[in-house]
């Protein structure tokens, strides 16, 4: 996944994720530049999805 894509669209992506997965909180979706793996790990755990599935979800947004 392109880091700039996450950085540039993160607020918009975060809103869409919260709409789709109501269990996600702002803490789950905290993103710091360079910490993509940490974010993906949190989402994997919270949504009970594999890494590839989480990356696919993010790329669709």
Image (cartoon, rainbow, N blue to C red):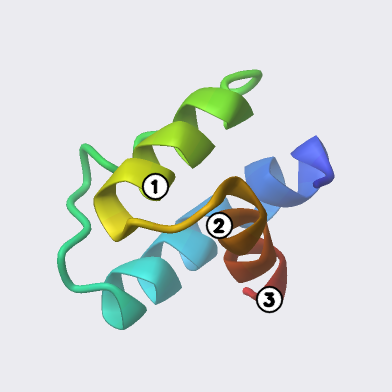
- Count numbered badges in the picture: 3
Q: Position of residue 26 (x, y in %)?
A: 22, 46
Q: Do the residues labelled 2 and 1 touch (CB within 8 Å)?
A: yes
First in residue order: circle 2 vs circle 3: 2
Q: Helix or strand or loop: what does disc 3 sit on? A: helix
Q: Name the residue under label 3.
A: 60
Residue 6 badge: none
Q: Which mark is residue 43?
A: 1
Measured as percent of width and height from the top left, residue 56 is found at 68, 66
Compare residues 19 and 46 and report the one nearer the observer.
46
Nearer-N-terminus badge (3/1)? 1
- Residue 20 makes an appearance in the image: yes
Quarter where residue 52 is shown: bottom right
Seen at 59% across and 62% down, the residue is: 53
Q: Is residue 7 left or right of residue 31?
A: right
Q: Is residue 11 left or right of residue 29?
A: right
Please give the name of the residue rendered at 58% of the width and 27% of the height, measured from the top-left corner. Answer: 37
List the residue tagged with mark 2. 54
The earlier-in-sequence mark between 2 and 1 is 1
Q: Residues within 10 Å of mark 2 (few under 14, many from 20)?
A: some
Q: 34 above or below 30? A: above
Q: Is the C terminus in the top left, top right, bottom left or bottom right quadrant?
A: bottom right
Q: What element carries label 2?
A: helix
x, y percentage for residue 35? 57, 21
Given this view, does label 2 or label 3 mark the residue nearer the observer? 2
Q: Give neighbour class at mark 1: few <14, some 14-19, many 20+ (Cα, 10 Å).
A: some
């Amino acid at each position: 996944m392109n880091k700039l894509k996450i950085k540039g669209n993160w607020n918009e992506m975060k809103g869409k994720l919260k709409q789709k997965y109501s269990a996600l909180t702002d803490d789950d979706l905290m993103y710091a530049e360079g910490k993509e793996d940490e974010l993906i790990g949190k989402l994997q755990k919270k949504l009970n999805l594999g890494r590839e599935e989480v990356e696919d979800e993010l790329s669709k947004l």
